[in-house]
Image: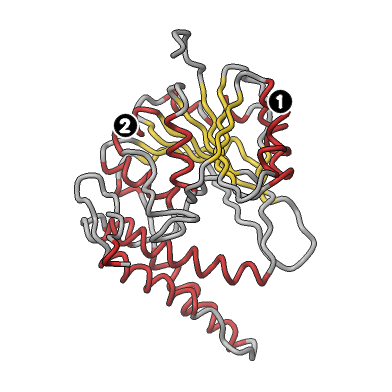
Amino acid sequence: MSTSLPPRYAVVVATRNRGARITSLLDSLMASEEPSFELVVVDQSTNDETRRAVGPYLSDSRVCYVHSEIAGTSRARNHGFALTRAPIIAITDDDCIVPPDWLTRLTKPFHEHPEVGVVYCNVEAVPVDQPGHTPNIRFHASRVISAMNMIHAGQPFWMGAGMAVRRRVLADVGGFDEQLGPGAPAFEACEDNDIAWRALVRGWWLYENADVAVLHDGFRSLEQLRTHVQRDYYGIGGTVAKFVKTGHWRVGAMLIPLIYRSGIAEPIKDVRHRRFPRGFRRPYMVLRGLYDGLRTPLDPVTLFYRPAQPSER
């Protein structure tokens, strides 16, 4: 085990079947203005294309590559956390590009506010000239969220494509809930919000950092969007359920705009424009996820969903 001082920052990237496309992210990370960081790539690919793409970067001692046979973004990130030593860990996705000052600007709130445990930044979409959507988020201004009552129903859900956590927060909350997130066995979304809500429950502050952004090359065609939206809305409902049944109603209230917008406002707009009303699938998936989440066993101390037993599958 190394006795040298840990780097100032760590970056953990979970990837699956990205292949050579991951090099755009790696090139941007290696161009960082902050040299004191360690990078862990946790690869859950079913082929060796990503491993071969990462290979040339392993000549840099800051880069670590590990392959995992177990699928799931949350599992991959937790695995990556265990391989790092830095006190602050940044997270981005394998289809993103970060600016050279990303690490320093993203993590600035940690140095200014010792109570801040989780930071999110803007995620901007790579422009695409065809029907579809790229997930993104933009904060109008930076702000601290120091208590659960500062979460309001109309605010957007944060994105794990641009976030950072203190290592001490990971010790408090136990990392990501591995029953949540893409590839998880229970609810395949919202793991990036769940970890922040659990940190807030334990007294840590959150920070929405409007001063820095990552570029997201995660375009989804209309066909892909239908599948992802159902998965995401079901996962959001299932994740929020754990906070509803433990009395954190502010988190639960975030479902109201989702249900109203897609289940009432958008269909009414369609009718006014003499179109067949659409969008009912989204509120249905949210409510179905909420119902299933309320029925899923939950550890009341860790706020982790308990893995299903063989007899329950």
Residue 121 locus on image (x, y percent): 54, 40
Mark 2 = which residue?
171
**In the rendered view, how is the structure colored?**
secondary structure
Q: Is residue 122 visible?
A: no
Q: Badge 1: few (under 14), some or many (20 or more) residues near its Cα, within 10 Å?
A: few
Q: Residue furthest top?
A: 4
Residue 106 locus on image (x, y percent): 54, 31
Q: CA distance from mark 1 to mark 2?
A: 30 Å
* Amino acid at pointer 1: Ala
User: The residue tagged with tag 1: helix, strand or loop?
Assistant: loop
147, above or below 168, in the image? below
* Residue positioned 37% across, 73% down in the render: 287
| Quarter of the figure with the C terminus | bottom left
**Marking on residue 31:** 1
Question: Which corner quadrant of the image does residue 127 belong to?
Answer: bottom right
* Residue positioned 49% across, 78% down in the render: 281
77, above or below 189, in the image? above
Q: Is residue 270 visible?
A: yes
N-term-proximal mark, 1 vs 2: 1
**Marking on residue 228:** none
| Quarter of the figure with the N terminus | top left
Residue 256 locus on image (x, y percent): 38, 68
Question: Which corner quadrant of the image does residue 271 belong to?
Answer: bottom right
User: The residue tagged with tag 2: helix, strand or loop?
Assistant: helix
> Closest to the observer: 189 or 118?
189
* Amino acid at pointer 2: Ala
* Residue positioned 76% across, 58% down in the render: 128
> Closest to the observer: 143 or 44?
44
